Amino acid sequence: MKIEDMIMISVDDHVVEPPDVFEGRLTAKYKDRAPHIVHKDDGSDVWVFEGRQMPNIGLNAVAGRPPEEYGVEPTAYDQLRPGCFEVKARVDDMNVNGVLGSMCFPSFPAFCGQIFYGAKDKELAIAVLRAYNDWHIDEWCGGAPGRFIPLAIPPIWDPELMAEEVRRVAKKGCHAVSFSENPEKLGLPSLQQPHWDPFWTACADEGTIICLHFGSGRGMIAPTMDAPMDAVITLMPIAMVDCAADLVWSPILRKFPEIKFALSEAGLGWFPFFLERIDFVYKQHRAWTRQDFGDKLPSEVFREHVVTCFITDPTGIKNRHAVGVENITWECDYPHSDSTWPRAPETLMSELGGVPDDEIDLMTYKNAMRLFRYNPFQHIPKDQATVGALRAQAVGVDLSLKSHGGLHARDGEGIVTAGQVARQLATAMTTLD
């Protein structure tokens, strides 16, 4: 397959919410208490909700910045590439990258709406959360029909409300919801508990896939606080093995035969060993651990229910059949620091040597369409959806790197450590003066 003939759908990107998200979406009772943007004396823009400030962390929106300026300092909108927060500019950036479709995780609310979960007034929280989901579906996704896969955030403090919201947004065409990979770390019941059953039931009923994004429960994972940030970044996808193990040995996959989960930003390379290991553990230990998968192996059940997602993973692609080609999807991660934008097609093609065209199509777009109930060809002819056709529409898009200066996450010179980044993040998230 030639690069220009590929069709690419990314199931993991991110949106930096524009300042007008909540305008006109709340009743008079709540509109003056909605999250809003404050421009601080240090030049950064932060979201403020119930007195808490949520900055946009630099590392979450580095597209178009020189790599030496990557860091976790709070940023302002005028420091960001417009594609981070403007729909038209995002589509331009998708076109220049040859990407047809994109599913965008939230930024300031956190991956599964933790900011709203932490609100003191839960009536305000649910009103704001629903307004956010409506903005995401109607304005962000609706602003470019066929180019985005809608993704909702749930009111994680109440499983019945979660089920209600899943059903509400499904009527609006949204069949993906973001949830925590480890809710226990948020002070909520674990995946092992029946507490979440109303939510699982609604997702199964509506054909809604549950996206468990790395960092949505545990946050940053560091071997030690003086470990270099390189170690933390290395662990990001591999660390999702904890979630995978928790999920496969939970009752969920056997109790809800129609349910689907996506392990977002989890990579592929470690899955073959993981699947071998869970089968060995089952055969070796089931007599005393009392697990029962009936006439199936744990790996079979896992493949039936769990979608894998990768950015760049030559080892995983080589072992794709051990993972399950029908469950593999691709992600770009725009505008985060791991993103391969704007050379994603070239990066991916360099890893696809020897892969048959039909399997490339599955991994780059067909699986995503089927699993996320997304059909961009209702709006865009297939011959206009290829890398070559989309890039032909992107003539004139400026790809030059823009320097914005900014502080680096370090105490003086030398290697950036996990502790330094943690301290800077803690400072950025303190209560607004």
Image (tube, helix red, strand yellow):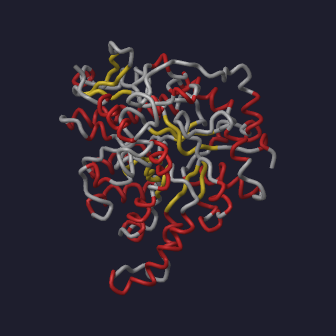
Q: Quadrant of residue 360 in the image?
A: bottom right
The single residue placed furthest to the left in the displayed view is: 120
Which residue is at a point 71% across and 25% down the rendered structure image?
A: 394
Picture coordinates of residue 32 (x, y %)?
A: 25, 20
Question: Above or below — where is 270 with respect to 384?
Answer: below
Q: Quadrant of the C terminus?
A: top left
Name of the residue lying farthest toward the right: 2
Between 349 and 102, the residue placed more toward the observer is 349
Res. 113 image quadrant = top left
Q: Quadrant of residue 27?
A: top left
Indicate left or right for 298 with 329 as reference. Answer: left
The outermost residue toward the bottom is 287
* Residue 373 showing in the rendered view: yes
Q: Is residue 266 above or below residue 401?
A: below
The total number of labels drawn is: 0
Q: Residue at x 45, y 50 (%)?
A: 211
The structure residue drawn at horizontal position 41% and vertical position 71%, both measured from the top left corner, is: 254
Residue 405 screen position, x and y as percent: 50, 19
Residue 138 in sight: no
Along the line of sight, the residue nearer the viewer: 259 or 401: 401
- The answer to whether 244 appears left or right of 129 in the picture is right
Q: Give x and y (percent) for residue 94.
A: 63, 32
Instruction: Say which of 293 and 75 sits in front.
Output: 75
Residue 207 spot, x, y in % from top left: 47, 55
